[in-house]
Amino acid sequence: MTLGDAPPAPAAFRRAVASLRPAEVRPEIELEDIPAPQRLAPYSAAIGASVYRDDDELAVGRLIVLFDPDGQRGWDGPFRLVAYVRADMEPEITEDPLLGPVAWSWLTESLDAHDAGYAAAGGTVTRAVSEGFGNKADDPVSTELELRASWSPLEEDLSRHVSAWCDLMCLAAGIPPLPPGVAALPPRRREDPEPFRT
């Protein structure tokens, strides 16, 4: 090792990062590696995702993996996952007083459905209304849901947590989860030829 070289990341963190790309991802979701914040923990990694229906982006999110061998206050173990999801919503949905508890249940029920063990979960659900003024006065009013959450995974293999986060994003986008054991058919793209008809 030369002066200035960073020490290699611990094996537990490397194994966790390797599990961020589950073998199967719903066809509506596109995953990508993104830069992770560097000051929250000694080691971090992140992925981003978008949920599409046809060519329309319905939801975006990011999932950050934090690792501190010594743990941190409020964590339950050396790992912490930090999730963010933003989705456009119809105005009448964002006005529903139960939206916060329902959106939070999307996270916890997705984690439970994937048997993703977790502890010390916490977060916020925010409804945002954007109105245009001045030269943007003609822009339509938009309403969004934002969910920010963190929890401590109970295992190094994070693939179940990623799958749960993907389900959370689909739910926020209005796409129902798939029943266990059912695979999604890939969506037909516009450039695909029409199916043969007799």
Image: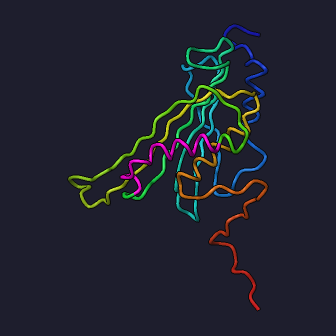
Q: Residue furthest top?
A: 3
- State the image coordinates of residue 29 (x, y, percent, origin top left): 64, 53
Q: Residue at x 45, y 54 (%)?
A: 88
**Up-down: is 4 above or below 101?**
above
Q: Is residue 36 left or right of residue 12?
A: left
Q: Which image quadrant is residue 176 in? A: bottom right
Q: Residue furthest bottom?
A: 198
- State the image coordinates of residue 163 (x, y, percent, origin top left): 69, 44
Asked whether 141 falls inside the magenta stretch, the response is no
Q: Residue at x 64, y 14 (%)?
A: 71
* Main secondary structure of the magenta stretch: helix
Asked whether 178 or 146 is in front, the reply is 178
- State the image coordinates of residue 68 (x, y, percent, origin top left): 65, 16
Q: How many marks?
A: 0
- State the image coordinates of residue 50 (x, y, percent, origin top left): 58, 50
Q: Residue at x 65, y 46 (%)?
A: 31
Q: Is residue 33 left or right of residue 15?
A: left
Q: Is residue 18 left or right of residue 133?
A: right
Asked whether 1 or 190 is in front, the reply is 190
Q: Residue furthest left?
A: 134
Quarter containing the C terminus: bottom right
Q: How is the image coloured?
A: rainbow
Asked whether 109 falls inside the magenta stretch, the response is yes
**Up-down: is 81 above or below 195?**
above
Q: Which image quadrant is residue 100 in? A: top left
Asked whether 81 or 135 is in front, the reply is 81
State which region is magenta.
93-110
Asked whether 108 or 82 is in front, the reply is 108
Q: Residue at x 50, y 33 (%)?
A: 123
